[in-house]
Amino acid sequence: MAAIDGPLELTAGDEIQVRNPLGTFRRPTATTGWRSWFTTVDHKKIGIMYGASALVFLAIGGLEALLIRAQLAQPNGQVLSPEAYNQAFTMHGTTMVFFVIMPLLAAFSNYLIPLQIGARDVAFPRLNALSFWIFIGAGLFVYSGVLMGHIPDNGWFNYAPNSGLSYSPGHGIDFWDFGLQIAGIASLVGAVNLIVTCLNMRAPGMTLMRMPIFTWMALVSQFLLLFAIPVITVALFLLMFDRLFGGNFFVVDQGADPLLWQHMFWIFGHPEVYILILPAFGIISEVIPVFARKPLFGYPFMVFSGIAIGFMGWGVWAHHMFASGAGPVTVAAFSLSTMFIAVPTGVKIFNWIGTLWGGKLRFTAAMMFAVALVSQFTIGGLSGVTHSVAPADTQQTDTYYIVAHFHYVLFGGSLFGIFAGFYFYWPKIFGRFLSERLGKLHFWLWFIGFNLTFGPMHILGLQGQPRRTSTYAAGMGWDLMNLLSTIGSFIIAIGFLVFIYNVVASRKNVLDNPDPWDARTLEWGTASPPPAHNYDVEPSATHLDEWWHRKYETDDRGKLRRRDKIEYLSDPNFDASSVHLPSPSYWPIIVAAGLPLVAYGLIFTYWLAALGGLLVVGGLFGWGFEPSVDPDAGHGHDDAPGHAPSPEPEPVAVGAGAEES
Amino acid sequence: MSATTEDTELVHAPTAHTEGHHTSTGVSNEKMGMWAFLGSECLLFGGLISTFLLLRGKGVVRGPQVKDLYDIPFTSVSSFVLLMSSLTMVLALSAVQRGLHRRARVWLLATALFGLVFVSGQVYEFTTFYKEGLGFSTNLQSSAFYVLTGFHGVHVTIGILMLISLFFMSLRGNLPTEKSETVEIIGLYWHFVDVVWILIFTVVYLIQ
Amino acid sequence: MTKSPRLRRAGQVVLGLALTLIVAGCASNAPQDTLKPEGKYARQIDNLFKPVFLIAVVVFILVEGLVLFSVLKYRRRSDDLDEPADFPEQIHGSTKLEIGWTILPAVVLGLVAIVTIPVIFTLNSHPKGSMDITVTGQKYWWAYDYPTQPDVGITKAITTANELHIPAGKTVYLSLKSKDVIHSFWAPRLNGKRDVVPGRVHTWLLQADKPGVYSGQCAEFCGTSHANMRLKVVAHDPASWDKWVATMEAPLTKPTSGLAAEGYTLFQQKGCSGCHKVDGQWDEVAAGNPSAPNLTKLFTRDCFAGCIYNLDDRNELEAWLRNPQRKAGSLMKIGQLSEDEIDRLYAYLQTLK
């Protein structure tokens, strides 16, 4: 676990004379070409890589979902064996939570936070690269197990004692366990990095209460990660010891209590839900005001309700265990706390409606996804309130009613928010529009497909169909709803294909204006896509919605009018040679490569673990002695006009030259 | 917690990661990063300590019980040594800050040595327990005990590695007074690990 | 960009579809419907759920109504030039509203809490005069043990599997145990579910108003055949209850001749008696073997193997004896049997009633 001291990265200044610390290879310098993506420390490139790889995992997790739905389309389905079914739903849940939604949100957080707070990069650019490569390593590691036939089959919640060696021999659970431990390190390193970035890297004048709402929600969710990840790490750690080294933590014959796992899992698991939803709330809180032509209604209340959710999220975990057999006092306490977490969530819903109210709404694809989040999350939230009534939950828990509930939260909420973000930020990130026509087609396919898939599950659950069952008998009254649900899931799949086609086709839709939506926050003031250094001059903020205030002013009669001269914050003719940017580095990917090796080693053969350990420790030492900014590198090597990173289009020409404000 | 209004050198200075760069809070990125990391570590040790406490007195009685094997005087001495290392850590930092590099190296080495004494004590303790018949798999308590204290031992070991790195940096003249914060940050980690040990020593060894 | 008719049509389609779904859902006959309680505990839960659900529906209509209203009313018109002069009023918020929509939901939830808490305690109580049954979950079937309790006529302990027999009207106090992993006992029309956790004894209540057969199943994922760990609760009227108890307590007669007698010997030769008890005939099972259902009075039951196969149907049991692995994850191991042997075993098993 040497990588735990990741955040200890020492800043070695220019004084250090070690150039090639281990004498092995020279520091990379390229910032263009495909190779540069492996050594980049640019938060924007890292964000793009997070997004791209998460979309691949989304396709895989989606295929797993289709398998599940195909099996359940009819009673006594024969598509999957019970073993394969259990593997499919385990991998579906694990993939969607850890390798799709978390990295998609990491993509937005990485890309947007520095831009939104007016910084050139995150606080620790190399750690940022490390987070990404560790995450990729974790995903590939788990799926390498799948390819080798070591497929976990005990659900994403992996309850003890069924996860123990006696009931789950083979290495499927081991791959799951190590995969999540490694992914946890990625999230933890990322959390430290982004927390410091939000608190420390803000441009002058960018006070906390002027931070864009997305950055705020991402910050709260990073704090949740910071404290939630270690808890599941302990649980995974103990399970690892049980399975590989003869530990007794979850062995009932030795007197262990299986509920220990449940408590640790859900102390992590419930904050995790807010980790998955809060940044999506942040995204739509950026999208809705732009297309409503109004500021966000009740910004401070949005911020405080987000923080309140963050705090209260720690006191509700046992509502996942209302049937587990805790005493009535515990159940009553958690029942109460769960009810009242609905209050700050409701505040958010009402504030979005307040933002829509009286606006002039433009229904772009992004806006449609955002408004759909509001209405679908409302359904998920309300069914959540019915679970908080603990006696009712003893009927609902572990049925399809719960499956419906959390898909309304995580799909109807998080994913819809994320796709609102895709349509909204695509021009910012790539300098290309996604087609609005195709985007709306995608929206309607998803809106109908999603509600058709998960709406009927409410009924199925109330009619008593338990979840995680590979089949059901005829004559239970569940046939029609299951069939509808399966049809819906295939509509969702078609919608996803439309999106992919849209991405491919977007190459031709070049922007003519870096701020196509007439947006409100700072990131829209620079070129689209932004130059490597983000802003020619560090911007300073005087308002919430800084960019809006740089575009519009109120005249003497209190009328809103567009300023005569709008100064963009980057200029293609800017000589970037004066800007020091953190230099690319091999170390992150080397350290990250060591971790899966350690895991393979602990599962199969120890010498691989030793090799992996060597990579990690050696990599960290090399890292420690490598200055963040390569003293040998010329200034601004990557920002000379006409040498923008090749996979991305040239920055769009922007208006008058930026001046110091 | 408003942003500083100090002017930064606009064109040249604002790289993402340069020492002396003014941060919004005035605390350096590295130090804040360490604080955040230690916050996370609290939950990690919290989870392990809670596990140990929850399993205390539970489980099938098999083999020796870990509580019967504690050698309190011995562990008290090694705990005291670890505690003293916090003092030498403070002295090392203060020496670096005052530019007394020779003295700083002495204190850094002393801190690392004290740490090493503690870890050796733990290795000795583990071997003794093992010889008494308390293996990792013997019972619930033994699993919990070895994981908790072993995990702490690994933290001390990582700290020792960092201290030795600092020592060599200083030896090669790479640890000037301006960079005393590096020592301070590693010191934060070291003190944290010590404080955690006091907690573990109290709840695991002393309170039965 | 005239979207109004299209949007409205889409909205109507969605609404119509949703209504159809709900109607279709409620109309169908579902034996595990949680909304049709048949016992006092299930009814208490239902009486709690339905009003809360109603509140949720009201809030749903309110919120979705506001969203829909905003979407339709405040859409930008096609003649809107999107000039600053036409921008909507730049409202930043309203503290009064914020306080309102913080307090109002809190009050409503407070009311929900007040009615919820007492039910939690009721469901966890141990009512006087209740009948005791121990339920043991294991991969992938249920065992039931009835201790001697003369007030319900049980004078000799009874053991059975998969079908839980209870007297209608009587409150039953279940002690839940597990032999292996976590299961969850659930008969939706009689009560909610309670997990069955190894190393712990959980308790739970059941009560059926009327005689009848109530379907249920394991609700906590327990491995390969989790879907096939079903159960039935059979509630009897007083007369049929007495009859059931009497049948269960009556000693078996050992077959002395014919196929059944040969089957009796085969039962041991093929190792069946190493795992399956038959009271008065095969009382000793081998230590370390997986636990298997007690087969005494097997042929008084309707179903077997986690209640997924029908015992009335001879083919089902014969198919099972040919290959117990037809239920995935089944722990039953039996060598290849000839059709002849299967006939003999079947003849013997038929005497267990």
Image (cartoon, rainbow, N blue to C red):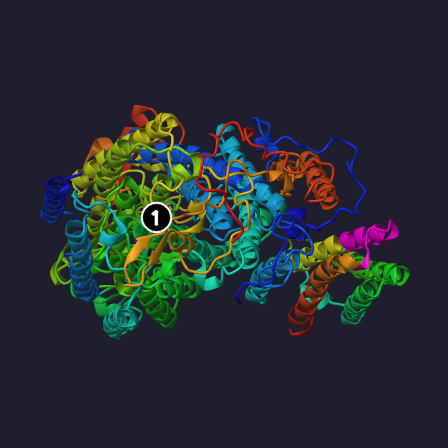
Give the quadrant of residue A296: bottom left
Left or right of residue C60, residue C296 in this image: right
Q: Is residue A566 magenta?
A: no
In the figure, C343 relative to C276: above or below? above
Q: Is residue A624 visible?
A: yes
Residue C221, given in percent of the width and then of the height, sits at 37, 47
Residue drawn at point x = 41 percent, y = 59 percent: A544
Give SS at disc 1. helix
Q: Is residue B163 magenta?
A: yes
Query: In the depicted view, which residue is nearer to us: A626 or C328?
Result: A626
Category of crowding for the residue at label 1, using alpha-carbon neighbours closer than 10 angstroms: few (below 14), some (14–19), many (at least 20) = many
Kindly identify the amino acid type of the residue bearing the numbered disc 1. Answer: Leu
Residue drawn at point x = 44 percent, y = 65 percent: A311
Give the quadrant of residue A581: top right
Residue A10, given in percent of the width and then of the height, sits at 71, 51
Give the quadrant of residue B149: bottom right
Residue A643, given in percent of the width and then of the height, sits at 56, 29
Q: Main secondary structure of the magenta part?
A: helix
Query: In the depicted view, which residue is nearer to us: A45 or A182?
Result: A45
Q: Give the magenta-colored segment's residue range.
A: B160-177
Return the residue at label 1: A410
Left or right of residue B63, residue C12 in this image: left
Q: Is residue C278 visible?
A: no
In the figure, A301 relative to B135: above or below? below
Q: Chain of mark 1?
A: A
In the figure, A550 relative to A107: above or below? below
Residue A11, given in percent of the width and then of the height, sits at 71, 50
